[in-house]
Amino acid sequence: MPLMRTSNPAFGGNAFQTRYGGAIDASARMTLSGTVNKTGILLLCVMATASWTWYLFTQSQDMSAVAPYMMLGVFGGFILAMVTIFKKQWAPVTAPMYALCEGLFLGGISAVFDAKYHGIAFQAICLTFGTLIALLLAYSSGLIRATRKFQIGVMAATGGIALFYLFQMVMGFFHVQFMTINGSGPLSIGISVVIVIVAALNLVLDFALIEQGVNAGAPKYMEWYGGFALLVTLVWLYLEILRLLTKINQRQ
């Protein structure tokens, strides 16, 4: 199987290019079950801190009560993600810390949106994990295969989305808004649907890269790294689904 690349930055570059083979004892190698377990632990970390910021906002109904924690989550999560990507062997420590930071942000932003559109956060969570399970089953059964063409298509689409967001951010400094795209009109909702689909398809590439790491006999710490990489995609997918649901609710 040729080495695959993915648009997930955590799996970019040389994530699994080394063929470890027999150089590592079997008990110290990355396993699929181990990666699943580590991913579960990371999700619990996210839920723990998300519950905290959710509670703070629901008790106060004041954005200022959670804003500092959300900012810590954004910037702390970004720094820890970069450290984890460049120092994969630190993943057993940095990946849980990243998950805790992401939880601070996700809990706060989810509570804010849920206060305006009751139940929207739960809907977004269900859709995110439903998508994860559906794609995992499709990948495991061979219904979806991470072929070279599939890989290139998803990477190109993800890169286009990243440039689109970057352009919007730069134009925002000049107070230029794209209401047609960011509003609640049919075009805006259509664009969000496409972005959600692209984010979901990144999960397929993540599954393939984790499978490749297991087959390559990667060291045990790569289980944490694989879980971290999946979490990066899941956070993106959740935020995009939350955004899509918000646009739909605004039309009602």
Image (cartoon, rainbow, N blue to C red):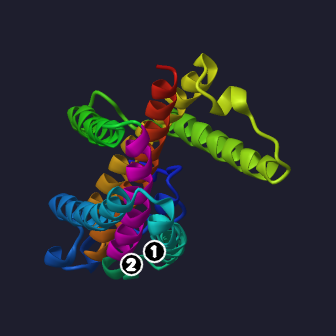
**Residue at the limit of the structure toward the right, as seen here:** 174
Q: Would you call the spot at circle 1 few (<14 residues within 10 Å), some (14-19), or many (20 or more)?
A: many
Observer-nearest of 61 and 243: 61
Question: Is 100 placed left or right of 29 in the picture?
Answer: right
Amino acid type, label 1: Thr
The residue depicted at 47 percent of the width and 79 percent of the height is 87
Secondary structure, magenta segment, majority class? helix
Secondary structure category for the residue under label 1: helix
Q: Is residue 1 above or below residue 190?
A: below
Horizontal and vertical percent position of residue 162: 64, 47
Answer yes or no: do the residues labelled 1 and 2 have beta carbons within 8 Å? yes
Q: Nearer the viewer, residue 126 or 232?
A: 126
Q: Which mark is residue 84?
A: 1
* 49 versus 243 height, above or below: below
Q: Which mark is residue 205?
A: none
Find disc 2 in the rendering and name its residue.
Answer: 94
Where is residue 178 shown, x and y percent of the image?
74, 34
- Is residue 79 a member of the stretch shown in magenta? no
How far separated are the C-alphas under marks 1 and 2? Answer: 6 Å
Residue 129 lies, in percent from the top left, at 27, 42
Identify residue type, mark 2: Thr
Above or below 252: residue 155: below
Asked if one can make out residue 99 in the rendered structure from this viewpoint, the answer is yes
Q: Position of residue 98 (x, y in %)?
A: 40, 71
- Residue 241 figure quarter: top left
The segment highlighted magenta reads 95-116
Q: Residues within 10 Å of mark 2 (few under 14, many from 20)?
A: many
Q: Which of the marked residues, 1 or 2, is nearer the chain's N terminus?
A: 1
